[in-house]
Image (cartoon, rainbow, N blue to C red):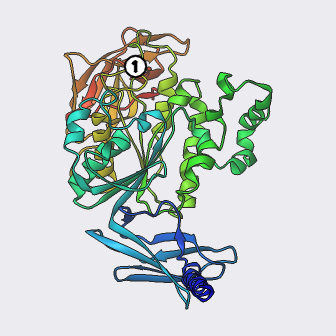
Amino acid sequence: MKSIAVLQLALVLALSVPASAGRPPSVDRLFTDHMVLQSDQPVPIWGRARPNEEVAVIFGEYRKSTQADGKGQWRAVLDPMPANDTPQTMLITALGPNGDDLKINDILVGEVWLCTGQSNLYVRMREGQVNDAKQIIASANQPQIRMSFNHKPWEAITPQTVTNHSAIAYLTAQNLHDELKVPVGIITITAGGRALQTWFNLEKFNADPANADIVEHWKHASEHSPKDQMYRPFLRPGGMDQQFMQPVYGYGIRGVLWYQGEAEAARDWGKRYHRLFPQLISTWRKIWDNPDMPFYCVQLPAYGKPADDPGAPSAWADVRDAQALDLPHTGYAVTYDGKDVDLHPKEKKFVADRLAKLVLQDYYYKNVVGVSPSIKKVIRDGSNLKVTFNHLRSGLKASASQVHGFAIGNDQGKWIWADAKIDGKTVIIDTAQMSDATQIRYAWADNPQANLMSKEDLPVAPYQGKIQ
């Protein structure tokens, strides 16, 4: 009996040693079954192994070897590969006598976009939260669309899985896939109520002298209740970066789709947004080592009661203005003409359609119209003003017999609604009621009553500026 027990113990030890010695390398949590890898650019893969262990990543005909550092961290970069809608397996193996393999299955290669923002992006594709959700869910058989929501494993989109994901992100992906005919991957990182400053690296944010007022504010957070509206935890600089973004940095993506800004509009932080938004884009382009990385945002939709006073300040218009960046490889989808003016509008499809068409026209050069007209300049023409436009392909139209939404003001702070009419590809404004007008606005309100659009049904972007 004793000899049998000893034999059994020896067998257990013999079986357990190779299992321990053969432990495969691990990968970061972003790399799971059903993921999409970005086509036509280098593809980083990273994880952990034994300190100084040799690791190989094999994906079809692509192979890269690397060595883990002294702490066991490794990173390999596969060469650029074309889009591929055939599911493949990635093999990650530790090289050497005790090596073992890790397999990641059902991988596609296509277009990957990072979608990030606050609550209107967070809203999932579920009945009661999104208009027409029942029909959209029932038809969501999209094996070529893969999505990951807040670090959860990637999923191929089906009627059963689509409800786990952002409605805006899914509907945008659907539009992109229909037009591009390649797999589309969406990494969604989102949380409600977050202000723009929370997406910044805290150490770098605090080191920037331009942020001294914000840094000083948060030094006193311990003296205030977390219920204090200005010291709410979700407004703290660096929060989104620390909690959500850091694991995503470096994953191969085509670009960023951004839907955020309500937090600033609610607190009249438009000036802050003007300063921080281009900084964030520049920072992320450096993180991804891609100075031309496209960055497209959803401009804030209409909110609240219709505008009555042509000269009233508008925090929502200020944020929209900050989102209308004049930076290379950026763009914004204009959405103030939506019919649902709730803080969380249920009409998500038209927003996603606008965002997708913007990306398809501006980045992929598809034959669609997705860039809204914007006011180029306003010049005096006798007793009238002449308004010219950027991004106007076919011409202008209004949804009613008259053009609504223009206002003119003078240096004394008086504003009046302007009498405007379409003249070909320009708008003519009569200044008879204010001959000393020096300023002009269009659609400048939380909920603008503006009806000028391109003949392709895209609304003219909000504007505030001087008359030349």
The reply, left or right, for residue 90 in relation to residue 246 is left
Indicate whether 76 appears above or below 226.
below
Q: Residues within 10 Å of mark 1 (few under 14, many from 20)?
A: many
- Residue at 36% x, 14% y: name it: 418
Left/right of residue 14 with respect to residue 432 in the rendered view: right
Residue 395 visible in the shown view: no
Q: Quadrant of the C terminus?
A: top left
Left or right: where 71 falls relative to 87: right
Secondary structure under badge 1? loop
The amino acid sitting under disc 1 is: Asn
The residue to which callout 1 is attached is 447
Can you say whether 276 is above or below 47 in the image? Answer: above
Of residue 458 and residue 133, the one placed in the foreground of this image is 133
Closest to the observer, 219 or 204: 219
Query: What's the residue at 48%, 20% (across, down)?
Result: 438
- Name the quadrant containing residue 227: top right
In x, y percent, where is residue 416? 42, 10
Residue 60, percent from left and from top: 34, 80
